[in-house]
Image: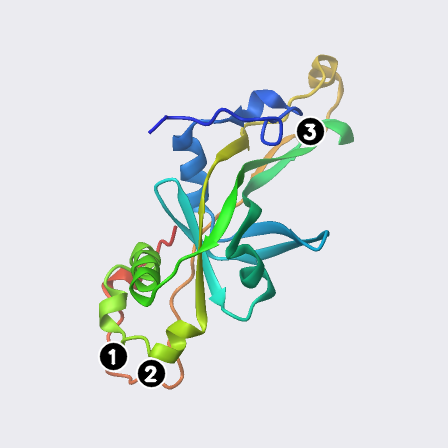
Amino acid sequence: MPDGYSPTPRAKIKRSHKRARYDKATVFEILDAAQMVHVGYAIDEQPYVTPTMHWRDGDTLYWHGSSASKMLRAVRTGIPACVTAAIFDGYVLARSPFHHSANYRTVMAFGRAQAVEGRQAKEDALYKFMEELWPGRWDACRENYTQEMKATCVVAMEIEEAAAKIRTGPPVDDEEDYANVKVWSGVVPALHKYGKPVADDRLDPDTPLPDYLSPYRGR
């Protein structure tokens, strides 16, 4: 498997191209860290962008939802799709309004989305998703009912090409402003963490908190 993508014009980053990354290690790291992605597609020339949870297995991205969903009914047939992920890492305050910015990690990935067919194939994909987030939870839950699986659509998209774009570090000001502009400048970091789990009101009080939630670190 090649270590990177060779972007065509649709994926090649032109603005701030020094921030571009096309290696798979960077692309996959950002996709795996993002809690959600946005899936872009067109139906009868009308653009749509749908936020959804996702997971990855090698070069393939997965997401799921209701079989009645307009988005899933459209993309499951193999139409072109664009999936984006974004992680906000902080505000960058500069010495001029023009140079204010943000630190971030983003990915734009392209491919053709198709439905995963068959109950076992769908459950295998969903199992990987749950095990990635909460190891051991799938086996602790009851089995899916047949009707539940019929109502669930799982979509797979092999990533044909992708580009990551990353900004890190302090503001980049005009050289003369460092000495002449006396205003606070720097970075306000964004913290990504989860709070203490809150039990369901109807949970049996004797039910222990699973190890994978103590503490929960998420993606």
Q: Mark 3 sits on what residue?
A: 94
Where residue 181 sits, quadrant-wise, is top right
Q: Characterize the local packing of mark 2: few (<14), some (14-19) or many (20 or more) Cα atoms within 10 angstroms.
A: few
Q: Is residue 121 above or below residue 144?
A: above
Separation of marks 3 and 1 at Cα, in angstroms: 51 Å
Q: Of tags 3 and 2, which is closer to the observer?
A: 2
- Left or right, 153 with reference to 142: right
Determine whether the residue tagged by mark 2 lies in a helix, strand or loop. Answer: loop
Q: Mark 2 sits on what residue?
A: 203
Separation of marks 2 and 1 at Cα, in angstroms: 7 Å
Determine whether the residue tagged by mark 3 lies in a helix, strand or loop. Answer: loop
Residue appearing at x 55%, y 63% in the figure: 73
Separation of marks 3 and 2 at Cα, in angstroms: 50 Å
Give the percent coordinates (x, y) of residue 183.
72, 29
**Do the residues under discs 3 and 2 have CB atoms within 8 angstroms?**
no
Q: Which residue sits furthest top?
A: 176
**Do the residues under discs 2 and 1 have CB atoms within 8 angstroms?**
yes
Return the residue nearer the eye: 63 or 37: 63
Where residue 168 sits, quadrant-wise, is top right
- Which of the two discs, 3 and 2, labels the residue nearer the N terminus? 3
Q: Mark 1 sits on what residue?
A: 207
Give the percent coordinates (x, y) of residue 134.
30, 60
Determine whether the residue tagged by mark 1 lies in a helix, strand or loop. Answer: loop
- Left or right, 46 with reference to 16: right
- Which of the two discs, 3 and 1, labels the residue nearer the N terminus? 3
Can residue 189 be seen in this snapshot?
Answer: no
Give the percent coordinates (x, y) of residue 213.
31, 63
Return the residue nearer the eye: 157 or 164: 157
Q: Which residue sits furthest front?
A: 77
Q: Characterize the local packing of mark 3: few (<14), some (14-19) or many (20 or more) Cα atoms within 10 angstroms.
A: many
Where residue 122 sits, quadrant-wise, is bottom left
Question: So how many labels did they put on this image?
Answer: 3
